Amino acid sequence: GENVEQHPSTLSVQEGDSAVIKCTYSDSASNYFPWYKQELGKGPQLIIDIRSNVGEKKDQRIAVTLNKTAKHFSLHITETQPEDSAVYFCAPSEGGFKTIFGAGTRLFVKA
Amino acid sequence: DAGVIQSPRHEVTEMGQEVTLRCKPISGHNSLFWYRQTMMRGLELLIYFNNNVPIDDSGMPEDRFSAKMPNASFSTLKIQPSEPRDSAVYFCASSSRQGYGYTFGSGTRLTVV
């Protein structure tokens, strides 16, 4: 089965700084790489995803980069704002049904 | 669309009682997933359905847990009898693209005392 690890487990940044969260996985068959954001009292929300045929994808202040050879992908948030404070999960999969979520990274953005 | 709708939002019950959690997926989504979230174990996949058919229930912790999807717009997760260690937030999610991107509900926070 897929082993998924996220680093760091907690990240604290100053407002306006950048934040990077890394996800490593073990299954070389994984071809779908999403990131979810979970705010307090809510369910996880898909914020960005990438397929294995693409190395990078950007959406305003967030981006995801993929290194399939090394089996890791990262979430990049630029110009962080207090509302970016949340728990972020990666969930690599073969695009099938059995998605395994990482343990989560708690991001604090200090105003 | 109202998104994935779960009920109740909160449930407090006594040990030994039956608990039923409900989920209405997004219309048109043909895959439905039940997850459990705890501090210790994170997000755990319990069971998923495709076109109303249970595909894999290997994540269901014990026979006390059961799930049904009688039609495309409704699913239930039942725990009978409930135990304190079942206390967690239970999420339902649906997807239209065979697992490519899930939409989660707001969850049901279950407390068994």
Image: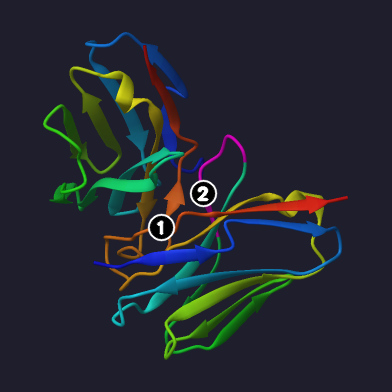
Element marked by disc 2: loop
Label 1 close to label 2 by CB (< 8 Å): yes
Q: Position of residue B25 (x, y in %)?
A: 37, 43
Magenta: predominant secondary structure element?
Answer: loop
| Amino acid type indicated by mark 2 | Pro
Give the CA separation, mark 1 to mark 2: 11 Å
Q: Furthest residue to the left?
A: B63
Please say if B14 is above or below A71.
above
Q: Is residue B92 above or below residue B7?
A: below
- The chosen color scheme is rainbow
Q: Which residue is mark 1?
A: A101
Amino acid beneath label 1: Phe
For the record, the magenta segment spans A40-46
Quadrant housing residue A14: bottom right
The N terminus of chain A sits in image quarter:
bottom left
Same subunit: marks 1 and 2? yes
Q: How many marks?
A: 2
A13 on left or right of A74 = right
Residue at point 18%, 20% (across, down): B80
SS assignment at label 1 = loop
Q: Chain of mark 1?
A: A
Residue of label 2: A44
Query: Would residue B104 appear left or right of A81 to someone viewing this image?
Result: left
Residue drawn at (43%, 62%), measured in percent from left and top? B101
Looking at the image, is B4 positioned above or below residue B66? below
